[in-house]
Amino acid sequence: MIPETVPGRPLAAYRIVLGLVAVVRALALTANPYLGNRPHPLYSFLPAVPTPVWTVVGLVMLAAAVLVVLGVRARPAAATVGVCVLLLMWGAGYYGNGAYLLATMSLLISCTRCDTDLALRPRRYADGVWAPPVYLMRAQITIVYVYAALGKLSLDFLSGNGLASWGIDSALAPRFLLVLPVLVTMAVGAVATELFVSVALWFRRTRPVAITLGLLLHLCMIGWISDSLIAVVELTCFAATTTGGYLLFVDRLPRFVERRIPEGSQASG
Amino acid sequence: MNRALASRLLVGVLALEIVVPAVSLATTSTPRHYAWSMFVESSTDYRYVGETTDGTHVDLDPGEVGRPWSGIHYGPQTPERLCARHPELTSVTRFYDTDLESVQPCG
């Protein structure tokens, strides 16, 4: 059911997306203690560590993120990004869904052959890009959407109340949309879209619709929830990590792309 | 590592990917960790205050116009209906928590 190999270029493109997100997050996480968000462990049994340690961790993450983007020792660099985010989440208490997803996807992509293409130092694998780890990443995207939808199955969200609370504070959401029929439709629509996207991404026929709806959903989310520039950046990073994952669902490259890839790269991916 | 072993490891990771958020969803309340719950239940309380012609402020109960939950934003119809129900009012103001959200002129 799962093919032996998948094309390397979409996976490499997602590696670059993840790397860019990691660069932004590394800068934000490193700056965090100096912007008034004092680090303290997420769990009480973890030791409190001085701020300079988290600065070093953030800078290591930044360097690793750059290597991920460039495709130089990309796999260990991706693993380093994942570990650094986990350290900052647990040790410094900078937990967030975006950070957690970045850590998860970074660790998962480090298990894939993401370094065969779009890299300064592309690696060659005689037997191509092994598909199962990429399918595991696909599954992760689906899991995020399914649980995001399940978490919204409450009166508070489905009544449009949550959207209203965000909309009032949002700098971008138009006030005339803060009416009950619109809010309820949007709330139910968001849950339905998440469930649809989670499944439809897996099928070639429904994939274009899923990608379009998914992108729209994330754009609306950024517009509706953002109450500051920092929130826009934060939500854009999360959207890029998630929607960038749509690249993982590419089973076959379009012919015009295949023709332009050098033979060696094609063999490896 | 051979591929058979790697495949088993991947199945294990997939199981974790599914089980961890399920446990979090079942056993914790918002804001949840590791459950991909992007939505944190809002704790906003909406209050309605009417102003009479002599400048007196009176607290209004949105339940009397069929809006029983103060934690739900019911849109502009609620202040309009409160205006209609209380002809003595000149305006109805809606607050979310301590902040003013909107002022609905009556009449």
Image: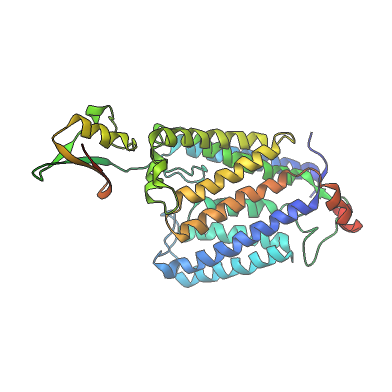
Figure quadrant of residue A142? top right
Q: Is residue A72 above or below residue A197?
A: below
Q: Position of residue B48 (x, y in %)?
A: 22, 40
- Which residue sits at x=22%, y=33%? B82
Total numbered labels? 0
Please name whichever residue, B35 or A202, is drawn nearer the observer in this view of the structure.
A202
Q: Position of residue A194 (x, y in %)?
A: 57, 37
- Which residue sits at x=32%, y=43%? B44
The chosen color scheme is rainbow
* Drawn side of residue B89 relative to residue A228, left or right: left
- Which residue sits at x=57%, y=36%? A193
- Residue projecting furthest to the front: B107
* Drawn side of residue B43 relative to residue B62, left or right: right
- Residue projecting furthest to the right: A263
**Quadrant where the C terminus of chain B is found in the figure:** top left
* Drawn side of residue A266 relative to residue A107, left or right: right
Q: Position of residue A168 (x, y in %)?
A: 37, 47
Please name whichever residue, B91 or A107, is drawn nearer the observer in this view of the structure.
B91
- Which residue sits at x=79%, y=41%? B4
Figure quadrant of residue A207? top right
* Drawn side of residue A202 relative to residue A179, left or right: right
Q: Position of residue B68 (x, y in %)?
A: 27, 29
Residue A177 in sight here: yes
Please name whichever residue, A173 or A139, is drawn nearer the observer in this view of the structure.
A173
Residue A94 in sight here: no
